[in-house]
Amino acid sequence: MTTRLDGQVALVTGASRGIGRAIAEGLARAGATVMINFVQNQVAAKEVLEQIQAEGGQAVLCRFDVGDGDAVTTAVQEILERQGKIDILVNNAGMSINTLLVRLKADEWTQVLNANLTGVFLCTKAVTRSMMRQRSGRIINLTSVVAQAGNAGQAAYSAAKAGVIGFTKTMAKELASRSITVNAVAPGFIETDMTRSLPEEAKTGYLSRIPAGRWGTVEEVADVVAFLANPRAGYITGQVINVNGGMYM
């Protein structure tokens, strides 16, 4: 069975930077035509597009807000009209507002849940009918180690990412009979612009909690996503794959 994704169409949300960028580039290297979703940073998204094209891959910029139901529906419909199908959906887009619960405002709570959980619902719902008709598909949702272990100052983010796990397992049961798999990938502390900007004291504290003794890389997360997107992963569904160096077991 093939380990390539030639001829497949993948939609990756939040693909302009960090883990999302690595996922988009990895799927393109495997042969998929990648829809690079972004909402604000067009310059960064264009860099991803150019990098994929420079390596001989195929990609298209796809600008919409995953938390806007009408925008999601319109964007997915346009992809289906132009590409003919969507084989792979990677729900990666998200954001966090880090503060203690007593300081967290209600609108901030809503903003975080909308980006990290409602967006997953909207994008999944938008692609599901076409995947059911073609009787195949891969849906991969990015959650987080904090969904399982919790983290002070991240009440909204932890709750949203925990919701992604419950949603993943439910969708896996609903869609398995149509040969659609739904899995989640839970990164731990990954080396990104955000982690690189942390104070040294904070970095030392976080590293002390990781048995592997180092940050993960975006490529290590992207490789897991690429495997789950592959035809060879057809008997894996409803699972949460931890990529955290042993931080949570």
Image (cartoon, rainbow, N blue to C red):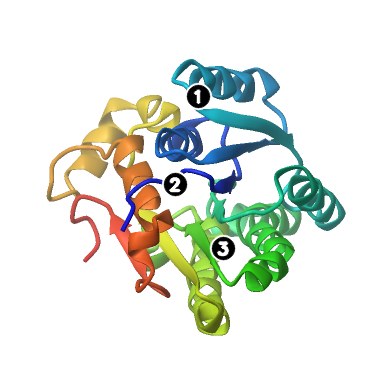
Name the spot of residue 148 as percent of width and height, x first.
Answer: 37, 67
Residue type beneath disc 2: Leu
Q: Secondary structure at mark 2?
A: loop
Front position in the image: 166 or 101: 166
Q: Looking at the image, tell me whether mark 3 or mark 1 is earlier in sequence order.
A: 1
Residue topped by disc 2: 5
| Distance from the alpha carbon under mark 2 to that under mark 1 | 15 Å
Question: Circle 3: is it few (<14), some (14-19), or many (20+) Cα within 10 Å?
Answer: many
User: In the drawing, does residue 227 fall left or right of residue 34?
Assistant: left
Foreground mark, 3 or 1?
A: 1
Residue type beneath disc 1: Ile
Q: Secondary structure at mark 1?
A: helix
Q: Secondary structure at mark 3?
A: helix
* Count of numbered circles in the view: 3
Q: Is residue 96 visible?
A: no
For the C terminus, give its image quadrant.
Answer: bottom left
Front position in the image: 196 or 153: 196
For the N terminus, give its image quadrant.
Answer: bottom left
Give the quarter of the image for residue 174.
bottom right
Query: Can you say whether 28 is above or below 108 in the image?
Result: above
Disc number placed over residue 52 in the picture, else none: 1
Q: Are marks 2 and 3 in contact (CB under 8 Å)?
A: no
| Distance from the alpha carbon under mark 3 to that under mark 1 | 31 Å
Name the spot of residue 40 as percent of width and height, x first.
Answer: 72, 30
Query: Can you say whether 240 is above or below 153 in the image?
Result: below
Give the quarter of the image for residue 126.
bottom right
Name the spot of residue 119 as percent of width and height, x first.
Answer: 68, 57
Residue topped by disc 3: 160
Q: Looking at the image, tell me whether mark 2 or mark 3 is earlier in sequence order.
A: 2
Give the quarter of the image for residue 37.
top right
Foreground mark, 2 or 1?
A: 2
